[in-house]
Amino acid sequence: MSIYRIIVCFTHLDPRSAHYLLDARALGFNNLQRIECQDLYFVEGQLSQEDLQQLTLKLLSDSVTQSALWVELPAPHPDLGTDSVTVEVSLRPGVTDPVAHEIVRAAHEIGIDGVHRAATGLRFQLEGLNADEIKQLAKQLLANNVIQHWKVGNIEPSFPEELESSGAIETISIRGLNDDELFLLSKDRRAALDLAEMKAIQSYCIKEDRDLTDIEFETIAQTWSEHCGHKTFKAKVTIDGGQQTVASNGQPSTVDSLIKTYLKSATDKINAPWVLSAFVDNAGIVDFDDDFEVSFKVETHNHPSAIEPFGGANTGVGGVIRDVLGVSAKPIANTDVLCFGNQNISFDQLPEGVLHPKRIMSGVVAGVQDYGNKIGIPTVNGAILFDEGYTANPLVFCGCVGIAPKGKHKKNPQRGDRVIVLGGRTGRDGLRGATFSSMTMDAQTGEVAGASVQIGDPITEKGLIDVIVRARDMGLYTDITDCGAGGLSSAVGEMASKVGADVDLRNVRLKYPGLAPWEIWLSEAQERMTLAVSSENLSALQELCNTFDTELTDIGSFTGEHRLVVRYDGKIVLDLDNEFLHEGIPQRQLSAVISEQLSVVSEQLSANVDAEKVLLKLLAHPNIASKSSVIRIYDHEIQGGTVVKPLTGIQADAPSDATVIKPQGTRGMKGIVLSNGINPEYGKRDAYRMALAVIDEAIRNAVAVGADPERIAILDNFCWGDPKRPETMGTLVEAAHGCHDGAMLFGAPFISGKDSLNNEYMGADGQRHSIPPTLLISALGMMDDVTKAVTMDLKEAGNEIYVIGNFQPVFGGSHFGLVMGEVNESIPVLHQSTPKVYKALHQAITEGLVRSVHDISEGGLAVAAAEMCIGGRLGMKIESNLWDDVVRVLFGESTGSLLVEVSPANKEKFLNTFKGLPSYWLGKTTQETSLTALFHGFKALDVTVSQLVEAWNTPL
Amino acid sequence: MKPKALILQARGTNRDHDVAEALTLAGAEPHPVPLSELRAGKARFDDYQMLVVAGGFSYADALGAGKLLALDLNSYFSEEIAAFVDSGKPVIGICNGFQALVKSGILPGGEKKDERRKNESEVTLTFNAHGHFECRWVTLKPKSKKCIWTDGLTELIECPIAHGEGNFQTSELFPLSSFVDNDQVAITYVHSDGSPANGEYPFNPNGSLLDIAGICNLQGNVLGLMPHPENHIHSYQHPNWTGGVNGCSGLALFQNGVKYASNL
């Protein structure tokens, strides 16, 4: 068989080339004169010249915009007659390449049957760089070593080697090992298990009087991983030296499980009748209306995104969508909160082995875009934050909301049901991802963990949605779960935890042969779901799968014997007791140190601060500035239900507080509200108050667009450093405690949560690089009538502006501090009366008394006012004699407060609603398009709206 | 009787439900049908009065948006679709559906049946001038009197675009002036006051030649367009409904098509 190499280039300008040039310049390759990007294809087969011509013209190129040439290998490629240098990049063998798959399929469709295999790549023509710079550019921008290889000049095609499957099983002797050897074994197999856990495995072996197979050991390591088992959140924590904290926060001296003590307990105590499922399933579920229920889950995909940003974020989105499918729901909205390092850091300052934050950001955003847009789910809510703490450990939070008819989700596999795998095939993708994500990364992680990275295939997952929602309506399955971290081991293991199962890995369909049994069992290949299906329903499910081009594989049965049995070709390779596997993990014992928090409020800042300059600087700060360049590459309109969009106002360029979705296919005008709260600046200073503040922010944002404050469910995502360090554990305890108190105050139950720990990076310099304590609170609100929703853009001139809520601005952790230098103060506190304020605001919104409302958050009152002006392209005249400390009022940060626009006609009614609650008249909206502020007659601010718009649109 | 609309579902079609809702509101009876069922003979083109190629990412846009769906249309359904088009029944391709109609040669189509395929090498929808996917609202002007979907529409249409490859371009061989003279430019991008976008971003969001957002065949019954009027059929979908804009301007296009189908 021959291999042909085909190059396709644009005859005019390839739009990708311009982006590569910009990115390269941004990374400092200023000598680069020109870069041209071309598509490279390798086709293996027996093809005539006419076949090749047909293939190239009909399939691989566009005859209006592109030209193509081809050659049979190993002939040298014809000289293109330029003095540019060529770099070629192609995927490593085994990395998912959907385009290559389509080339083979489509070639056969047009009658070119000689095509056997295909591979794709990119080819770059570069001018202006020396040999060393070219190598650097290839490494830093053109290729990612983890999934691709690259070469200066012509690259060789790489097809996966077609090996025969060995079925080889390794036996691991554990019974006779001493402590050191146990520890070494855990490390060698990258199991991330500690000594107590290794000893528990040892006693199991002694009890069963046998050694373990490699697949058994890997299964235990996966089931007991931090990622799957939440060991830290279930640990017994002893708190040290917490005298002062006991006084301030009422923190007891030991905590038996953070989840039970702080998160589940809040949900239990609130006991909201509309919570249908919390913490137990793949996603939390709440009541929507008489017909439907709504589910929500937020996951993190941090470690994979650090080493392969596109693939990491891509599969993060794919994974959380499957979580929602795992509760039998149709996905209707995605959310994405992203944290990156400083975009302008120089290469010399980067720890070894770390990708540049710019590259991480563009890859992550492209990965989110690719999956969400292609699968057809609107990406509607999110945030992007920057901090140097995220340089080596970017955070990628992916959320998904689903909707399902009530009472259709089944979670009860029956003895005799078949174990069915739907969707993509299994390869070496993502091996040991569950344990990998539980480890601290080092400079070698990128290379060693290459196999932990998966690339998504959203179209295959779209097929899963089509099949599963229909199978659900037809009642074809008795249980369902997704294949996420831990692959089949986790999915089948979990489903079989009550009844037991017996599966044969020979039945699993593989992308390519040669996988050892443990690799098949642990593979984290994407786009797979596992179902329990009775034999009678199997043919109906098969028919659905045929219609939607989705593969179905029957790999075994649920036995009712309470053991997990895995075979390879009939021979038993794994036979574990369910109870040991799922309950046998010893509880971790951790200690925490809680340090005293700062509680200072300094008197008054110098009056010499130039408020106008500060405001423009704040608006241009990457945490506050417009995210439209990212938001607009996500499809946020598909499914037709985005009632309040991420960008709003008359030019659709101002930031909404929250998103309102009216789900397609529901009756009435009911809607879902999505918002989030996150604040690493507060997290660095006081984890307890931070937790309260971000819960408040998420709820406030939701209420601001119209959510009913008594119907808000929240989700927690903790991203922390290494919990084995008592100081880190201390902040985690504080934050969990804050979560409890915040949820109780607002009556907002947690319905789901997730933690990602060990977000630390051991640099080659021997220094620890950890992220700031980061808690994301995602809120899922409800509103009875979406047409009552309010947006944050000013609506008309001549209206009144009020501040409502406990507005007590401070500078601790403020963005004022970030742009002007740290101010030694504590972070904002949350006031007990805040829920009442939100209730009153909701009443005012429901009665139609509010023209616009915006929360006061990062950057304080001045930034909130400026954003409202931008939204409506109207002015605001602030005129107040209430406060003396002008800088504090304008830029200090506070919880629990918002700016509200009210028409003069509704002023009385509005104020009545707020009787007994804090509300202050602040000023008026004006036709004259500038934002001015007069305090006691002193003009602190006078900025035109176009200046505000310009500052706010500073590129990230 | 309500006209029955066949909505093609390929692997990766994802705005099928959106357009089904628009057709329902416009008075049709939508039937989303996977290509696999049409291939298996479980559904037939000639049982329907309207044909819709919905938006999405068929085959993940591999090898160019709409390319592989176009290949399917030509490989498996070329006679059925030709018969459908020749019968004069309304056909619409939106976004990915437009791309597939163009890349299969169904649009802009030729004078005679056998000329239809020729155009696949003269017209294309390529990468947006800015080089990336974009989701934003645009203002459209329905222009063609020949096109049964746009004929008689006097109001501007506001609706979102959501595409990365919507830049309409032609080769030098393409008879652009007769194409324009033939009234085949069905819909163009305009400023909010209705004046031509003249290539100005973001009013013309993708760099399309002559601000072209949608084109029709010579017969006028096949329309292809990049924007999504199916996402502006309720007033609460408009980005500025909270500011008092009362919209739904995307619906008229579907009502026009459905009315035409009902009178056939």
Image (cartoon, rainbow, N blue to C red):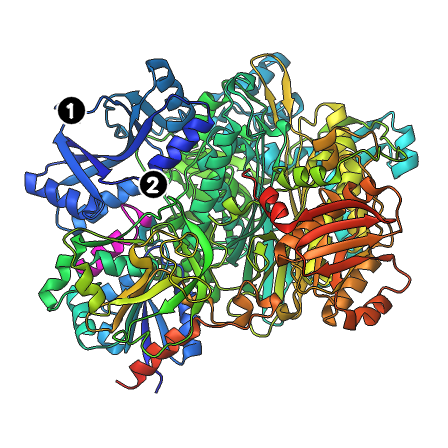
Question: Which label's residue is closer to the chain start, 2 or 1?
Answer: 2
Chain for numbered disc 1: A
Picture residue at 46% right of the left edge, 28% below the top: A26
Q: Which residues are magenta?
A: B61-74
Residue A88 visible (yes or no) = yes
Chain for numbered disc 2: A
Identify the residue position indicated by label 2 in the image. A15
How packed mark 2 is, by other alpha carbons closer than 10 Å (few <14, some 14-19, many 20 or more), is: some
In the image, which disc is placed on residue A79? 1
What is the three-letter code of the residue carrying label 2?
Pro
Q: Are marks 2 and 1 on the same chain?
A: yes
Residue B69 image point, x, y percent: 26, 56
Residue A417 visible (yes or no) = no
What is the three-letter code of the residue carrying label 1?
Asp
Quarter of the image that includes the N terminus of chain A: top left
Compared across the picture, whether B178 is left or right of B157 comes to left
